[in-house]
Amino acid sequence: MAEIDLFNSEFDDHAAVVAETRRVLRDPFSRLLQLCIRAVQAEGKIVFFGNGGSAADAQHLATELSVRYIRDRAPIPALALTTDTSALTAIGNDLGFDQLFSRQVEAICRAGDVCIGISTSGNSENVLAGLRAAHKRGCIAAGFAGRQGGRMVGLADPLLVVPSVTTARIQEMHILLGHMLCGALETELGLV
């Protein structure tokens, strides 16, 4: 019986977070979408970065854009800063883990690109440093966070803060929002 209680409880919690996320994030999501459209139309790119599960989300979303999400179509320029093991290990070893994303942003991003930092707490130091570097390069520094947004508040704009304190629920909403962004970009850019 405990497994059925857990099963039902997880679905109930997920559904409640979905409803609240839907209620509070429509406008920030719309702003992020418009900024991404503008960047791609100006021959810019969308860059994702995060740690752990957020690193996996960054890779997942960049792939959906650069390959396809719904149908075969022209690629949307996107990449994740979590995939180059040589860069990650060199930066971590030589400069420190906190510079993992900022160094890459400095190297490959240009004004007008959209840099999306992903952190469930909103407090990952290397994500914050990546967003600060994005600002310095003239990029749009955006973010996905949870809880109250942590230190990403005021640094990432737009910032999509999932209204939950549960890491699993935050991650579930991040991938849902990311998938919505991919689908909306395909549609709005006339690629499907």
Image: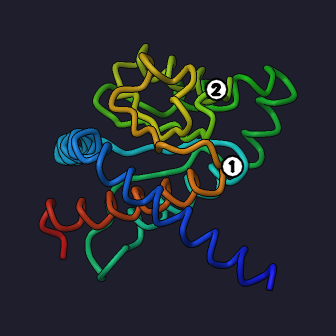
Q: Residue furthest front?
A: 1
In the figure, is residue 123 to the left or right of 98?
left
- 25 or 184: which is nearer to us? 25
The answer to whether residue 65 is above or below residue 107 is below
Crowd around label 2: few <14 · some 14–19 · many ≥20 (10 Å): some
The answer to whether residue 112 is above or below residue 138 is below
The answer to whether residue 43 is above or below residue 169 is above
Secondary element under disc 2, as helix, strand or loop, is loop
Going by the numbered disc 2, the residue's amino acid type is Asn
In the figure, is residue 173 to the left or right of 187?
right
In the figure, is residue 74 to the left or right of 6?
left
Q: Write the residue at 40% across / 39% down.
A: 160
In the image, which disc is placed on residue 84?
A: 1
Percent across and percent down for residue 40 are 24, 47
Which quadrant: the C terminus?
A: bottom left
Q: Which residue is mark 2?
A: 123
Q: Write the residue at 79% across / 20% down.
A: 95
In the figure, is residue 87 to the left or right of 164?
right
Crowd around label 1: few <14 · some 14–19 · many ≥20 (10 Å): few
- 77 or 177: which is nearer to us? 177
Q: Earlier in the sequence, mark 1 or mark 2?
A: 1
Q: Write the residue at 35% across / 44% down.
A: 45
Secondary element under disc 1, as helix, strand or loop, is loop
